[in-house]
Image: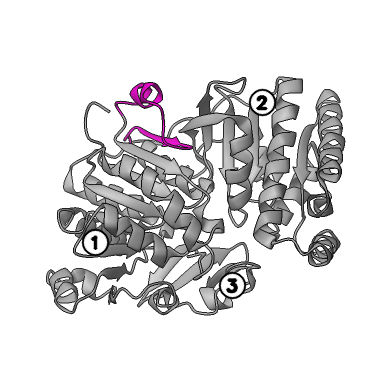
Amino acid sequence: MTEAPWVTWLGDDFTGSAAVMEVLEFAGLPAVLFTGIPSPGLAARFADCRGVGIATTARSHDPAWMAQSLPAPLRWLDGLKAPILHYKICSTFDSSALSGSIGAAIEIGLRIRPARAVPLLTAAPQMRRYQAFGHLFAGTLDGVFRLDRHPVMSRHPVTPMAESDLLRHLAAQTGLRSALIDLEGLADPQAVETALASGARILSLDSMGPVSETAAGRLIWENRAALGFVAGSQGVEYALVRHWQASGAIPRVRAPEALPPADRIVAVSGSVSPITARQLGWAGRNGFALLPFDARAVTGGDADRTAEETRLTQAAIAAAQAGQSPLVHSASGEGPQVDAFRDALSRSGMDPAAANRRIGESLGRILDATLRATGIRRAVISGGDTSGHGMRQLGLSALVARAPTIPGAALCQAFGDGPHDGLEIALKGGQMGSEDYFGWIRAGGGDRRE
């Protein structure tokens, strides 16, 4: 990198990491997401980027894995000398003391980028994630819910949220003292110093809309010398962009145009979200071939898993040759497919995290083989954890956002040394997107707000 970027980030999953890149890129600030520490040659290809990120799968790992795996990419990013080093978390705060611990990540980050305190900005109003007086709310197709009453997050199979007060939830993950700068406090010019004087090392920031979001961005940017390590969702970049625009540091720009439509795409999904289930239903009525992946295969031997991958790859290729867009999915919401998998998982004694990783890897291999065989050059991976494990099977090293869809799930272009270099791909979290999302990607994306 020839000039220091403005922001660097390390993401705890792939979809959220790509969302950060999208926020910056579509605000007119060139940004790139790497899938690991890049080679000097690859980094040099993106020397003009003002935002540089690396994606990980930390959200699905324990603190021991994080302690071993996060320091190296954090040090590489810190070495780029951006004034803000951001540990990117999910906007629904997916975490626990045993899986994806945000507290553990903050402690690791502070050892690499020392700071007087760490701003924590989880809300992203553009994505219908709101924080008011310390409590997080998240939107679904059916409305906005406090996190502990959210129909998905309150019952999440790995990180269920029984507490919407984020600092209370975080207290089980770290002993660092914390303070809340709420909607009233954002207007107080002494709020940061007051919080620091109390001994707080984590500063949770409310954000509900343009005014509070701009205030949060101003607080982070104007205190960057002392608070240069930040944790939060892509709401951090949304807030910074609002402040930079309001202060005249960058102009407001129009979103990019849609890409040309594709006659067919290939998609895989590992999400059990009811939102994804609705999207699968729409896809099945609109030119997609829905191909169920029997997730029970990952709980057995390698032969079972290989046989299921081969079966689905052949079915996907046949569907594509018939003019359809193959969509391989391990679940369609909660139901018999998921119940059968959980029963097999229980009988096998396999760790659920290992089984989920295997599902993502299998879907990635099916996607890889189908793209190679058909020559199709546009794809979707649905599911936050699935995206990380699946992307690694494609041999891709970098992503750049090209066309918007819903916030956080843009159509991107991927780069790598293998046959998928230049592939157009979208990574979508399970709880994100319009009902026709898969069709939107097939159509080339594009802003629908006008």
**On screen, residue 205 above or below 430:** below
Residue 137 locus on image (x, y percent): 48, 71
The residue that disc 1 covers is: 215
The residue that disc 3 covers is: 160
Magenta range is 28-48
Question: Going from the N terminus, do you reach mark 1 or mark 3 first?
Answer: 3
Res 156 label? none
Q: Amino acid at mark 2?
A: Ala
Residue 416 locus on image (x, y percent): 52, 24
Question: Going from the N terminus, do you reach mark 2 or mark 3 first?
Answer: 3
Residue pictured at 56% horizontal, 35% vertical: 445
Q: Nearer the viewer, residue 235 or 370?
A: 370
Q: Nearer the viewer, residue 290 or 60?
A: 60
| 143 inside magenta stretch | no
Q: Within 10 angstroms of label 2, few (less than 14), some, or many (20 or more) residues?
A: some
The residue that disc 2 covers is: 262
